[in-house]
Image: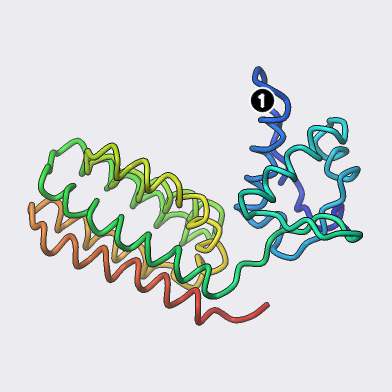
Amino acid sequence: MLSRGLPQGAVPKLERPGPLRERVYEALLELITTRALRPGQHLVESELAGHLGVSRQPVREALQRLNTEGWVDLRPAQGAFVHEPTEEEADQLLTVRTLLEAEAARLAAAGFHEAGVAALEDLCAKGERAVLDDDVDGAVAANAEFHAKVMELAGNAVLSELAAQVDRRVRWYYTPVARQRGKQSWTEHRELIAAITAGDEQRATAVMRAHTEHTRRTYHERERS
């Protein structure tokens, strides 16, 4: 049941103002992305509405939109279910991520500035603390922030826009392997910071490509729960 599937405190508060349907959509998408709602889980409109404190109509509209975007599967006579990504879907997405982020790393190294590197150092320390505390959600969030910062430092608006389109799915795939990647992921982040600091475009590209490839491989090798 949904009521047993959502951890304590997992349901985000619906911030105001803004259209209700948009806020419900964002709340459900966040629950899916963080895997509070797990792949394959049955989504019951009335229960979701109760958790979010809204009527069923905006929930129904949100589920239809999430279905269109590939986050939810609507099955005739069965209802809505969180989409279960295939290995091929994950592989294609993570491969595209590698291409985008390797170029972002190269551009970040080419345009090195101290404030940007200092921000990366802070985010890396934040992620390392989360790993030490076994805070998976914190590690996932810090990882997303770190990669977003590298993308920002790249200074290419088109590249950033493309990366934003895959960012949430990257988080979705990264969450189940965050604990496995653990400290090694942040060691690789430190290597990337060093390459960017040195202005070594070739090294930064290689480090980021290897880093994202490690995540892709770990996802495919993950233990089935």
The figure's colour scheme reads rainbow
Q: Position of residue 41 (x, y in %)?
A: 78, 62
Residue at the spot 17% in from the left edge and 54% down from the top edge: 106
Q: Position of residue 20 (x, y in %)?
A: 73, 25
Residue placed most toward the observer, 18 or 70: 70
Residue at the spot 50% in from the left edge and 74% down from the top edge: 219
Query: Relative to 100, is 61 on the left or the right?
Result: right
Q: Position of residue 186 (x, y in %)?
A: 34, 62
Residue placed most toward the observer, 156 or 35: 156
Query: Relative to 49, is 175 on the left or the right?
Result: left
Residue placed most toward the observer, 68 or 50: 68
Looking at this view, name the residue that lies furthest to the front. 76
- Against 161, residue 172 (above or below) is below
**Residue at numbered disc 1:** 15
- Against 40, residue 23 (above or below) is above
Q: How many marks?
A: 1
Image quarter in which the N terminus is found: bottom right
Image quarter in which the C terminus is found: bottom right
Residue at the spot 51% in from the left edge and 55% down from the top edge: 171
